[in-house]
Amino acid sequence: ESPKHHTEDKLQKICHLLDQEIPHFNWTGFYFKNGDKDELILGPYVGAETDHKIIPFGKGICGQVAVSGETFVVPDVHLQDNYLSCSIDTKAEIVVPIFKNGENIGQIDIDSHSVDPFTDDDREMLEWLCKEVSEIL
Ligand code: SME
């Protein structure tokens, strides 16, 4: 297992790469379960600063994925009741859970400035990526 800072460096690089390579990814970050608490804490990210550094389980798209353990694609955030707004520019979001030893321990969260931008390829790529990321945690 890598020291914590190595892992964080790698996660930060993944955020930069996704941000650079995929034009409709406009905020890319990781959230992880915060110790024993039923909440997520923001990890490495690229994009505008967010007020949502801690998200209770069940709150927002991220908090719902922490509970469901399933990818959540939101084509239009304005149509969601249980949504935490980070930026008025955000129109769509995808959140993919990360499992370690069968436990839902975190997620990757992508926001887009376009409505309905995420393709099946994006989803498959992110689900693959989350399995890879799990191996370095
Ligand atoms: N929109 C998310 C909160 C995190 S920000 O997008 C960075 C949500 O509803 O959980």
Image (cartoon, rainbow, N blue to C red):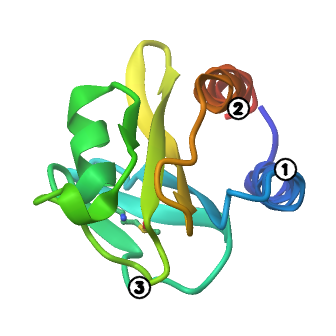
Q: Earlier in the sequence, mark 3 or mark 2?
A: 3
Q: Secondary structure at mark 1?
A: helix
Can you name the residue that lies furthest to the top here?
102
Circle 3 is placed at which residue position?
Answer: 88
Residue 128 relative to residue 12: left or right: left
Q: Position of residue 39 (x, y in %)?
A: 26, 56
Q: Secondary structure at mark 3?
A: loop
Amino acid type at circle 3 is Ile
Circle 2 is placed at which residue position?
Answer: 133
Q: Quadrant of the N terminus?
A: top right
| Numbered disc in front, either 3 or 2 | 3
Instruction: Decide if ligand 1 comes within 8 Å of the CB at mark 3.
Output: no
Q: Nearer the viewer, residue 25 or 107?
A: 25
**Corner quadrant of residue 19:** bottom right
Query: Vertically, is 16 above or below 132?
Result: below
Circle 1 is placed at which residue position?
Answer: 10
Q: Residues within 10 Å of mark 1 (few under 14, many from 20)?
A: some
| Numbered disc in front, either 3 or 1 | 3
Q: Nearer the viewer, residue 67 or 137?
A: 67
- How far is mark 3 from mark 1, CA to CA? 29 Å
Residue at the spot 68% in from the left edge and 57% down from the top edge = 25
Residue at the spot 45% in from the left edge and 53% down from the top edge = 93
Amino acid type at circle 1 is Lys
Q: Position of residue 115 (x, y in %)?
A: 47, 58
Residue 100 relative to residue 10: left or right: left
- How far is mark 3 from mark 2, CA to CA? 29 Å
